[in-house]
Every structure is written in structure tokens, then in C-alpha cells.
Image (cartoon, grey):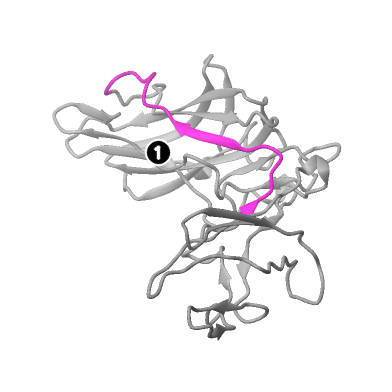
Amino acid sequence: MTLKYKDVNGVEKTSSQAVTTGNQAYSTSTFTGLTMYVPMNDSADIDVYVDVPTISSGSHSGAAVSVLIDADEGFKAIDSAGTTDSSAASSDVNSAANSGYGTKYVKKSVPTLARLTTGYTTNTVASGIGLYRFSITADAAGSIEWREISFTVTTSGVMTSAWIMYDVTGTAIVINDTSTTTNASGGGTTLSICPDTNCQNGEVEQIGAASTKTYELRATVSGWGDAGDSITISFAEDTSAITDAAALGLHTAQNMVWSDRSATSHTTTTTDWTNGYLVKDTDNDTRACQFGTATTCTP
């Protein structure tokens, strides 16, 4: 573990200590002799870094890493008058708290999703026309696999059904089950897309290291063309971390199911699958089309 801070002269200082286990609730690093300076009635920043081994060096996929500054065990600050303060705060200062930088999770590789703004038939909503395009890129550290990606589809005045996802060559690779049909009554519906015919089967899509695949959602559309008709599509995000598990048991409760392929003899039954929590670039992901006197889609 490494600390970085500034002394009274504004010079950045660095101090490192090993992380050890003992009688504390957490693995611990203890630093002494620090010269961090905090002006009177002011504040100063301290940056904390943790060296995390790679999975090939012994880390476990999905392991959670956060840092706490112990509030009242071993803390010591001395003011200009020589008075000692032995309490850093009323409770441990936790990086995983809302005010912190959060919890980091160990992965062998990660996917990045991106909604695409090009490649559409401009301002068109019709059966067999691409309604949503996006890409998935695997990190250069290794290939990834996915078994489920979900979308929130909201409609008004139009019926959409029989959703199919295609790759950029136009080859059908995925068909959703009938429970994901959206209807003319409006409201948001979760559209879950899985390889093969439904999410109960065990097929996967693999994306090679540093590679990208582009996908397009199409549907059967009926009733489009009246003033007020609309359709809005975005990624359905997972909002909390889960314990890594086998793939087939995750799809009913998770919006995205993917793997970093870190397990020995990786399959859909090995426990190196997780959800889409913290997968990058699922924000700014909405595509919307409306009909007034003509169809207008953004983008």
C-alpha cells in the first residue's frame, strides 16, 4: 500500500508499507513518521494506492478491494502547539462509502459497451430495420464472453415484437423469448437477449482480446405512423455487485451476464460469471424515435 501527500513546503511525499494480516478486522498497513501537513482550519488530500496482483499471480476474479482509514486505532496527528489527536473521525473513513471512490473489483479482462450513432436507416422505424446499434469491446488483457444483455424498451402507440439481434454481417445470432415483447400501451419493458433461442440455453458469444463486435436490434413493428407514436431503447443496467457464479443461474435476476474467462477449463458452469455492474459506457445510451408529421430519430 502506498500513500501520497504533501508536506508543509508543498512537496509531494510517498510512503509504502506491506499489507499484513493480524488481529484487525481487515488486512492492515501501518504508517509512521509521516510529514503530511494540514493548514489550520483547512484540509489536505491523501491518496491511497493498493498494488493488486493479477489473476495469473493469485488474485481471484470478482475479489472486492476497498480501503479504510482506521478512525481510532493507531491514528495520531500533532498540531502546531504539540497537542495530539488520536481520532481521525467518528467512524472509519471508507473508500466504498458514497463520498469515496468506491470498491474496485479484480477481473482478468473487461468489456466496454457503446451505443452507436451511425449505421442506421435515417429517421426510419419499420419491421426489419435496425432500431438500436451498439458495440462490445474486450480489453487487451484477454477475451470475454457474454450470455445475456438487456435493454429497456419503452413504446407509445406502437407494437413491437419478435426482436432479433444481428451482427454487422446481418447473420442472426440471437433471438429473445416471447416474454420480452413490448406493446402499444406504453411503459418500459425489459428486453433480454441471449445467444440461441432463449436465456435458458447455454450458448455464449465470445469477443477476442482487444477486439470489437457490433450488434443491431431489429423487431417486427406494427402501428407506426400516428402522431405521438414513440419508441425509446437503452441498456438496462445492473445496480449492485454480485458474487461470481455459474452462468445459467444468473440470467433470471441480472440484466447482463458476462465472464472474464478466468477459471481453469472455463465453461458456462464455472464460477467466473458476473453481472453488468460497473461495465463501462452504458450511460449516454438512449436512442429515441418519435412520429409527429414524420419520423424523427435521435440520433
Q: Nearer the viewer, residue 170 or 266?
A: 266
SS of the residue at dot 1?
A: loop
Majority secondary structure in the magenta region: loop
> What residue does disc 1 label?
285
Residue 223 as seen in the image, left or right of residue 227:
right
**What is the x, y in percent for residue 56?**
81, 40
Q: Residue type at mark 1?
A: Asp
Q: How many marks?
A: 1
Residue 56 as seen in the image, left or right of residue 69:
right
Among all residues in the image, which is located at the extreme bottom? 83
Q: Quadrant of residue 75?
A: bottom right
Residue 264 as seen in the image, left or right of residue 81:
right
Identify the residue shown where x is 68% and y is 43%. Answer: 200
Q: Nearer the viewer, residue 240 or 247?
A: 240
The boundaries of the magenta stretch are 104-123
Identify the residue shown where x is 70% and y is 51%. Answer: 62
Q: Quadrant of residue 152?
A: top left
Which quadrant is the N terminus positioned in?
A: bottom right
Instruction: Reply above or below: 140 against 246.
Output: above
**What is the x, y in percent for residue 30?**
71, 68
Q: Nearer the viewer, residue 107 or 130?
A: 107
